[in-house]
Every structure is written in structure tokens, then in C-alpha cells.
Image (spheres, coloured by chain):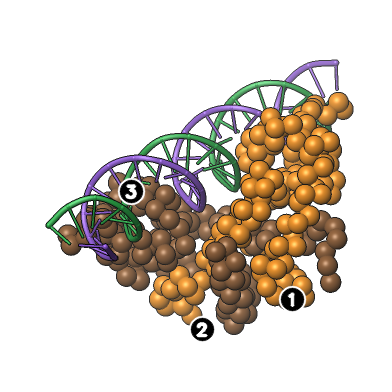
Chain colours: A brown, B orange, C green, D purple
DNA sequence: CGGAATTCAATAGCGCACAATTAAATTGCG
DNA sequence: CGCAATTTAATTGTGCGCTATTGAATTCCG
């Protein structure tokens, strides 16, 4: 089976992912407004709540983002007193990011969010997880194809 | 079953979609560089190759984007001579977007791209389509929840 | 040991995305 | 008809996300 003509945008997996991603951001918006966080900032906190005192590089690896994105984002969080940034004493190339008390306390308020998400997506936890696994595997194949 | 703790980022569907979307953009990058298009610009052309002489509003509805995103993007394409923008003669509130000859001719070169994508994603066309349908339905549920 | 190569974060510039606002054209309704 | 309400696109401002580059610290290796 070979594609001879340009596919319609509605038939394309990449666009389904692209538009579902935007829909998720819009869905999160009113919930995250309560914490005064953007969606990418929320992702940073998810990583830090799990384990903080990590470097910019490690954070970027978890989120598949580079320092050009991470650095200014984290600086904005630092300016608000939610995280701290300081050079590693042993290897001064690295910058370690830690939660402040205020940043850590936000987790409690944020607990309401995943509840609303499961409700908003509508499916069973099992079907959500199956979809997630397919997307993870897709991301891995795409990443592998880029190198 | 109720969520009591914050989920890990790797367990979250929204992040799987978010990161798969970025992986797709990175995968497309070298192919789109050959056309000197960004990924969102490519999506605009997919819509226009299918049917041009449409308004900013219609284009936005196809892509789930608003004029704040569409207008500057299309202006950049106009500056390169790939599309034209002109006010509708009947209803001057509307701006109609048409392909130029050069813009239309790009479709032939672009045909190589979806072939590479199917190869890069690796799965069967059937499994790709099943995944796409799940994501479309998810997007609809999320949009409905936002109202 | 010492210079070259590598690693790491920061920075500058471009192009989305989106919210909020503005301005103009059209429609609705008394 | 006339004026308010609505529709449409453009504009402004903020925050990603990426590329390319820079500069500093560290590691590699002869």
C-alpha cells in the first residue's frame, strides 16, 4: 500500500496529536489559573514534587526539553519564590533546582487537577493508560528516527 | 478508584501527547526544511491544497487555532509569495486566503513527506488510524468539557 | 602536566499559541 | 430607517520551544 496523494489533515496522526495537545492545554487552563501556573510550568512541578534538587539537564531529559526552554521558565518560577537555582558546588557547570517551601506546598492544591482530568477525558483508567503507552512507544520511534 | 497522590509525569496521558507532539515536530523538521516551512505552516498548506480561497475563520476552525495565530503566520507566507490575502468583496470583514501558483506547486515536493512519516512511525496504517481516531475522540471530549 | 575536546547553562532571535483588546463591517430589531 | 449587538480580523503582550551561539568548567589524552 503506497500513498500517491497528499492525505487530508483530518486523516493525519500528527495533527490529531497536535490538536489534542492544544485541547489539553485549554482544558488545564482554568484549573492551572488557580495556581497561577502555565501548563509547562505545571509539568516542571510534577517532576520537582517527585524529586527536586536536580540539574537543568536532568529536568530537560525528563521533559524532553533543552536549556533554551528550561532556563527562562525556571527563572520565572525563581522570581516568584517557588524554586531556587544555584550552581553545584562540585561541578559548577551545573545548576541545581530546588523547591522552596512555597513551591512544595503547592502540591496539595494541585491534587484537585488530575482528578478533574480523568473526569474530563472520560474514558476508563485502563483505556487512558493503553493510549498513553501507545503514544510513549510512538515518541520513542520518532526520536529514534531523528538520529 | 480514586487518585490520592499526584501521579508521576510518566503516567500522565497529557504529557505523553505533549511530548509525542514535540517528537513529531522534530521528526518533521529536516523534511520541512527542504520546503522552508515550519510545521504549523505545513498544516496550513495541507488545508489550502485541499481547498483554498477560504477565510481566516474557516482556516482557524480546521486547525483549531484563532486569528492571533493564523494572521501573522499567513502574513509571513504572503510575504514569501506563497499565498494571497484579500478582503471578501461581499463581506469586507472577512479575509480570503488563496494559494499562488508557487504555493500550489509546493504540493508536489511535499508528497515525499507523508511517505517518510508512515515509515518513521513504524506501525501499520490500520494501527495508526486507530490511534488517530482515539485522539480525535479525546480532543472532542476535552473541547466539550471546556465548552 | 597542559592544551584540545566536551559538557553544561545561558542567551539571542524566530515563530507559534493564546488572552484580551480594538476597529471595522454587518446584522438584528424596534 | 437608525442604533445596538454581533461578527470578523488584526493587534498587543506573555510564555513557550527550538536553533545557534557563547562562555565557563570539566574531562580527555598525548
| Residue at left offset 75%, top offset 36% | B82
Residue B102 drawn above or below residue B119 = above
Q: Which mark is residue B1?
A: 2
Of the two numbered discs 2 and 1 in the rendering, the one whose residue sits closer to the viewer:
1
Residue C1, image x, y percentages: 12, 57
- Determine the image quadrant of residue C11: top left
Location of residue D30 (image quadrant): bottom left
The foreground one among B84 and D30 is D30
In space, the residues marked 2 and 1 are separated at their CA atoms by 34 Å
For disc 1, the marked residue is B124
Q: Is residue B73 left or right of residue A3?
A: left
Q: Using a 10 Å C-alpha cutoff, classify the residue at mark 2 as few (fewer than 14 neighbours), some (14 to 19) or many (20 or more).
A: few
Q: Chain of mark 1?
A: B
Which disc is residue A45 wearing? none
What x and y, as percent, mark residue B25?
A: 60, 56
Name the spot of residue B64 as percent of width and height, x first: 69, 51
Above-or-below relation of B128 to B147: below
User: If the image is split into quadrants, where does the C terminus of chain A sit?
Assistant: bottom right
Discs 3, 2: same chain = no
Asked if residue C9 lies left or right of residue B86, the reply is left
The residues tagged by marks 3 and 2 sit, at their Cα atoms, a distance apart of: 38 Å
Q: Position of residue B53 (x, y in %)?
A: 84, 38
- Measure the C-alpha gap from mark 1 to mark 3: 43 Å
Give the secondary structure at mark 1. Answer: loop
Q: Which residue is mark 3?
A: A75
Q: Secondary structure at mark 3?
A: helix
Q: Earlier in the sequence, mark 2 or mark 1?
A: 2
Q: Nearer the viewer, mark 3 or mark 2?
A: 3
Image marks 1 and 3: residues in contact by CB distance under 8 Å: no
| Chain under numbered label 3 | A
Q: Residue at x 48, y 56 (%)?
A: A39
Amino acid at each position: 500500500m503506497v500513498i500517491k496523494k497528499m492525505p487530508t489533515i483530518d486523516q493525519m496522526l500528527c495533527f490529531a496529536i497536535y490538536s489534542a495537545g492544544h485541547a489539553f492545554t485549554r482544558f488545564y487552563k482554568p484549573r492551572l489559573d488557580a495556581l497561577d501556573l502555565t501548563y509547562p510550568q505545571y509539568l516542571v512541578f510534577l517532576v520537582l514534587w517527585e524529586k527536586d534538587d536536580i540539574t537543568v539537564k536532568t529536568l530537560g531529559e525528563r521533559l524532553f526539553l533543552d536549556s533554551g526552554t528550561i532556563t527562562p521558565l525556571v527563572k520565572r518560577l525563581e522570581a516568584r519564590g517557588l524554586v531556587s537555582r544555584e550552581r553545584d558546588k562540585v561541578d559548577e557547570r551545573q545548576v541545581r533546582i530546588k523547591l522552596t517551601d512555597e513551591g512544595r506546598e503547592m502540591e496539595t492544591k494541585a491534587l484537585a487537577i488530575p482528578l478533574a482530568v480523568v473526569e474530563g477525558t472520560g474514558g476508563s483508567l485502563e483505556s487512558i493508560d493503553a493510549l498513553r503507552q501507545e503514544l510513549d512507544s510512538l515518541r520513542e520511534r520518532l526520536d529514534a528516527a531523528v538520529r
